[in-house]
Image (cartoon, rainbow, N blue to C red):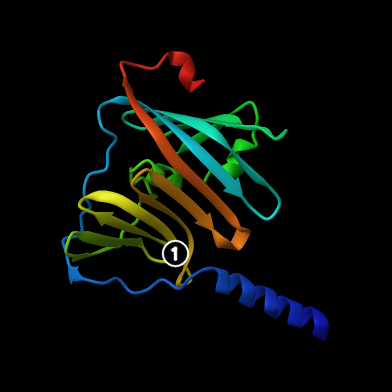
Amino acid sequence: MGFNRAVAVVVLLLTTASCAPHAAPLRGAVAPARLPPTALPPLHRKFLFHWSYSDRDIRARGDGAARVAPPDSVRIDLFIGQGLQGGSAVLIGDELRAAGNDQIRRYLPPIPLLWAALGRVAIPPAGDTIVRRTGDTLRADIGRDPRWRTIFIEDTVRRLELIDGGRIRQWVTRTGNQVRYEYPRQGRTLDLTITRVDTVSHFDATTWR
């Protein structure tokens, strides 16, 4: 490997690492290794929202809808203008299916972070769980490397992080009617502003196709 190429590789590695913040040690008093329940409530709900997405290549924004049904089903529709394509996706459990236009996969976070955006913890099974509490805030590390860090406030999921190599690689935060997904290494962000939540009696079977 030539000198210039070696320098370029080092710079790239340093730049990539610097984009992902360090994961601080868990704070607080040791708590029992169990998490608050986060199952979807026994209601069929429709969320309406504004959204905006950006990465190194594109920017897009528009309106959207999420139809959520317990125990583990959601349909997401993104509508945009500016000549760009939106799309629809159905998430059931840990399987995400794009309906027609696969572009929507680019806009959405990985499945565990997508569920966290809806307030549900659904991460791959892991044997190691460390939980600490500070006042009304509970933090839990699940797994080793990589590991998932979940932050609850008053038993509600506020943040889920994917930590690898001691750095926070991707995360979702939930504050009020705002949801934000970030993946610094790829320059990806997705912001949702929830404008309305309706409870409905049921969803037609075609919703999940």
Depth check: 52 or 148 in front? 52
Say which residue appears at 51% left-offset and 56% top-offset.
182
Residue 25 x/y as whole percent = 33, 74
Say whether residue 200 is left or right of residue 180.
left
Few, some or many C-alpha atoms within 10 Å of disc 1 (few <14, some 14-19, many ≥20)?
A: many
- Residue 43: percent from left, percent from top: 28, 25
Q: Position of residue 111 (x, y in %)?
A: 47, 44
Q: Nearer the viewer, residue 137 or 13?
A: 137
Q: Nearer the viewer, residue 164 or 125?
A: 164
Secondary structure found at label 1: strand
- When asked about the image quadrant of residue 17, the answer is bottom right
Rendered image quadrant of residue 145: bottom left
Residue 122 on image: x %, y % = 36, 45
Amino acid under disc 1: Ile
Give the residue at x 76% y 81%: 6
74 shown above or below 53: above
Which residue is depicted at the point 81% across and 86% down?
Answer: 3
- When asked about the image quadrant of residue 137, the answer is bottom left
What residue would you read off at disc 1?
163
